[in-house]
Image: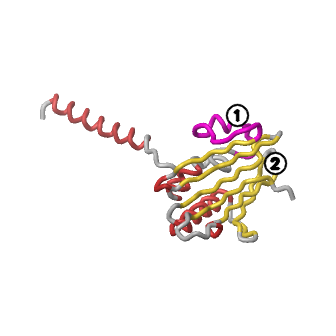
Amino acid sequence: MSFSKKIFLKNILFLSLFAGFISSCTNTESHLSKYGPELEGVMRSDFGTFRGFNLGEQMDTVLAKEAGLGVDADEGYLYYEFKLNDSNSYNISYSFDDNGLNEIQSDVYIKNPSNTERVFNAFKSYFDDHFGENENHQGFMVWTVKSEKYGDVRINLSDESSDFTIPGSPGKIALWIYPDKQ
């Protein structure tokens, strides 16, 4: 084999290895993808308590990091609506007090009600994995986490699909994050 062919083959091998390294570094699959596209779309980040936020965040921080302009906003409140895949959707309301973000509520609407249990279980598994085993309080799955500004914070998760009585109505999963004031 000639010297130029050896150099050519070494360069091809090097470029192949380099391309493989670059593609492995740019793998965009998130840690959230194992919980399904609905949870991944709603949570957006596995940092913080919800979507990369913790209670106590300032309103301008939430505004800067949240996707797009909210549907409604005032001095202590932000409200957003988003679409997910397969015509599923969700909304989020953020409430603020003098200490910053003090409450988050989100409703996830699952167009095909037969998928609601799967999506609910994905949220349950995610919160169990990140915040420990849940407790059941009057039909709600509840997790308690610590906050610098509020002490104990509760995360409530519930399937509220039964609120819709019309056949074929979407499923509804409700999430509520708030300081424990007991």
> Residue 119 appears in which quarter of the rendering?
bottom right
**Residue farthest toward the front in the current orientation of the protein:** 166
* Secondary structure under the numbered disc 2 in the rendered image: loop
Classify mark 2: residues with Cα within 10 Å, few (<14), some (14-19) or many (20+).
Answer: some
* Kind of residue at disc 1: Asp
> Residue 2 appears in which quarter of the rendering?
top left
* Kind of residue at disc 2: Tyr
Against 116, is 54 above or below?
Answer: above
Q: Residue at x 72, y 37 (%)?
A: 59
x and y percent of residue 103 in the render? 75, 49
Against 66, is 126 above or below?
Answer: below
x and y percent of residue 78 in the render? 69, 42
- The quadrant of the rendering that contains the C terminus is bottom right
User: Do residues under tags 1 and 2 come within 8 Å of each other at their CB atoms?
Assistant: no
Q: Which residues are magenta?
A: 54-76
Q: Residue at x 75, y 71 (%)?
A: 138
* Label 1 vs 2, first from the N-terminus: 1
The image's mark for residue 60 is 1
> Relative to the observer, which residue lies in front, 15 or 118?
118
Q: Is residue 89 magenta?
A: no
**Residue farthest toward the top in the current orientation of the protein:** 4
> Relative to the observer, which residue lies in front, 113 or 180?
113
Q: Residue at x 52, y 68 (%)?
A: 168
The image's mark for residue 150 is 2
The image's mark for residue 79 is none
Instruction: Give the alpha-carbon distance from disc 1 to disc 2, as whole Å.
Output: 19 Å
- The quadrant of the rendering that contains the N terminus is top left
> Relative to the observer, which residue lies in front, 6 or 72?
72
x and y percent of residue 95 in the render? 75, 45
Left or right: 23 as drawn, with respect to 155: left
* Secondary structure under the numbered disc 1 in the rendered image: helix
